[in-house]
Amino acid sequence: MRKIVPVQPDGASQTVDAPAGQSLMEAATQNNARGIVGDCGGACSCATCRAYIDAPWAEQLKPADDIETGMREGALDVEPSSRLDCQIAVSDALDRIVVRAPVR
């Protein structure tokens, strides 16, 4: 199992296990990580799973496709490190990735 580290806006964090191939959003929501939401179930149609990806992890991700980019543009408080967690698959390269939840 790989680990992901969701961090809340207040700085509280937890570490959760995630199998390779599962999305960051699925791993976070299945482990009740506060702040990571996935209202559309991972269909890339709501942007509720938006979060900030810490460097150096952000540089290791595949670029966002046009659909993710369009959904992200409609979200609040978008930063260059903002991504939709439903579009990021857990892999060995992302073990211990830090995912910061936005203020909601």
Image: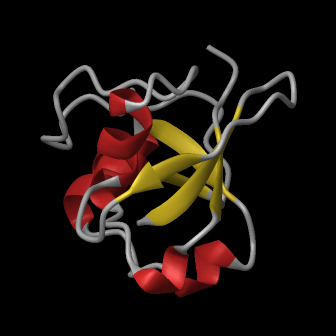
The structure residue drawn at horizontal position 31% and vertical position 27%, both measured from the top left corner, is 38
Image coordinates for residue 11, horizontal then vertical, percent: 87, 31
- In the displayed orientation, state which residue is furthest to the top: 104
As drawn, 77 above or below 80: above
- In the displayed orientation, state which residue is furthest to the right: 11
As drawn, 19 above or below 32: below
Q: Nearer the viewer, residue 52 or 93?
A: 93
Q: Nearer the viewer, residue 60 or 75?
A: 60
Q: Would residue 73 be found to the left or right of residue 102 on screen?
A: left
Answer whether residue 8 is visible to the viewer in this image.
Answer: yes
Q: Nearer the viewer, residue 77 or 26?
A: 26
The structure residue drawn at horizontal position 30% and vertical position 55%, both measured from the top left corner, is 23
Q: Would residue 69 be found to the left or right of residue 17 on screen?
A: left
The image quadrant where one finds the N terminus is: bottom left
Image coordinates for residue 66, horizontal then vertical, percent: 24, 65
The structure residue drawn at horizontal position 25% and vertical position 58%, both measured from the top left corner, is 22
Answer whether residue 84 is visible to the viewer in this image.
Answer: no
Image coordinates for residue 9, horizontal then vertical, percent: 78, 26
The structure residue drawn at horizontal position 29% and vertical position 57%, both measured from the top left corner, is 87
